[in-house]
Amino acid sequence: MKTLPTTERCERMHLRTRSGARVFRLPLEAFPGFWACAYLVVTDDLRLLIDTGSGVESANEGLLTGFRWVGEVLGQPFGPENLTHILITHGHIDHFGGLGFLKTRTDAKVGVHELARRTLTNYEERLAVASSRLERFLAQAGVRAERRQELLAMYTLPKMFFHSVPVDFTYEAAGMRLGPLEMLYTPGHCPGHVVMRLDEVLFAGDHILAEISPHQSPESITLSTGLGHYLASLRLVEGWLEGVRLALGGHKRPVEDIPARIAAIRETHRKRLNDLLGFLETPHTVAEASRFMFGKVGGYNVLLAISEAGAHVEYLYERGFLGIDNLQEVEADPEAPVRYRRLVKTGVSL
C-alpha cells in the first residue's frame, strides 16, 4: 500500500539513454511531506515532460526549479515554454494536477490514455461520480456515517483546486508511441495507466515502485481498477522488458532489477490474499479486514487502507473464494454493511 505521508524525497537524476536521449528526474513535493517525481526527456526534436506533480504551490515551484536546473545542465535557459509535449502516465492528482499551472506557460501538446481523458477534460463530473461511488463503498464496507463524511472530505479536499483542462491527443489514437517513446496500457492502479519505454529506461508511473506495492482500489468504485487488472498488467510488463534495465517510478527510488521487483509485488499480494482468507473464516466487513491487514492507521492512510482491503476482498469474492454472510440484510438494504466469509479451503496462487 502506498502510504502517506512519506518523507522520502525524490532526488535529482540526469542520465543518457543508449540512443543519446537525456532524461532528467525532477523532485516535486506533491503534498506536505509527500514527494512525487516528474521526468523531462530531451531528444533532438522533442522536449517531453512526463507527469506534472499535484498543482500545489510547492510542486509547481519544484517544476520551475527543476527546469532551471535542466537549463544549467544543457547550457541554455529552459522553461515551460520550451516543452513540446506533456505526457500523463495516469489520472491521479499527484501526476496531472500541475497541468493547469503549466497550460498558462506553454503551448506543449498534452497527451493521455483514452481512459484518463475524461478525468482531465471533464474533471468536475469525474470527481462527483467517484465521490458518490466511494460513499456507497464505504457504507457497504461498514464505515459508520459520520466517519464516512470525514473520509469523503479528506478525499475531495486536495482535489478541489483542479479544474478541467483540454487534451490534445490520446495514446491509442497515436499508435501508443511518440517519437522514440513507446507506451503500454497497464490498467489496475488507475484506469488509464500507461508505462513508457525509451531505450533501456521504463517510465513506470505508479505501476512498479521500489519498496512499496502500488495502491489498489476496488473496481466497484472505478472501472478498470481492481487487483485482477493490476496483476494482469504486471504480466504484460514482464513480457515487455526486453532491453529495459531501469524503471523510473512516480515515487521512491529507481528500480534496477525489475523482474525481481515485480515478483516481490506479486508475492505481497499473494500473501495478503491468503492471510485475508484465513481472517475471513469468520464473517467480517471490509473495514474490519482493513484493520486486520494494516493495523491502526491515521489520516489519509485510513482511506487507503480501506480501499486496498476492498480491492483484495473484491478479488477473492469475484473468484468464488468468498460469499456474503448476511445476504438477506444486504438484499433489504443495498448500503448495509456487507459481511464476507470464506467458502473454499484452497488458497490463492498468483
Image: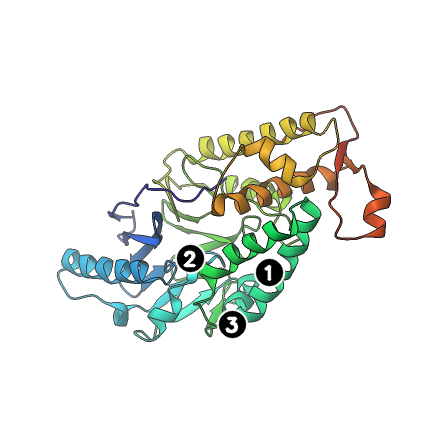
Q: Tell me the residue that label 1 is attached to.
A: 131
Asked which quadrant contains residue 45, the reply is bottom left
Q: Position of residue 308 (x, y in %)?
A: 58, 42
In the image, taking residue 36 as reference, residue 115 lies left or right, namely: right
Q: Tell me the residue that label 2 is attached to.
A: 95
Q: Position of residue 328 (x, y in %)?
A: 87, 44
Q: Position of residue 119 (x, y in %)?
A: 53, 65
Most foreground residue, 299 or 263: 299
* Residue depth check, mark 2 versus mark 1: number of the one nearer the observer: 1
The amino acid type of the residue labelled 3 equals Thr
188 relative to 213, above or below: below
Q: Position of residue 155 (x, y in %)?
A: 52, 56
Residue 321 seen in render: no
User: Which of the marked residues, 3 or 1, is nearer the chain's N terminus?
Assistant: 3
Most foreground residue, 183 or 264: 264
- Going 57% across and 48% down the picture, which residue do you hit? 188
- Going 40% across and 33% down the picture, which residue do you hit? 257
The amino acid type of the residue labelled 1 equals Ser
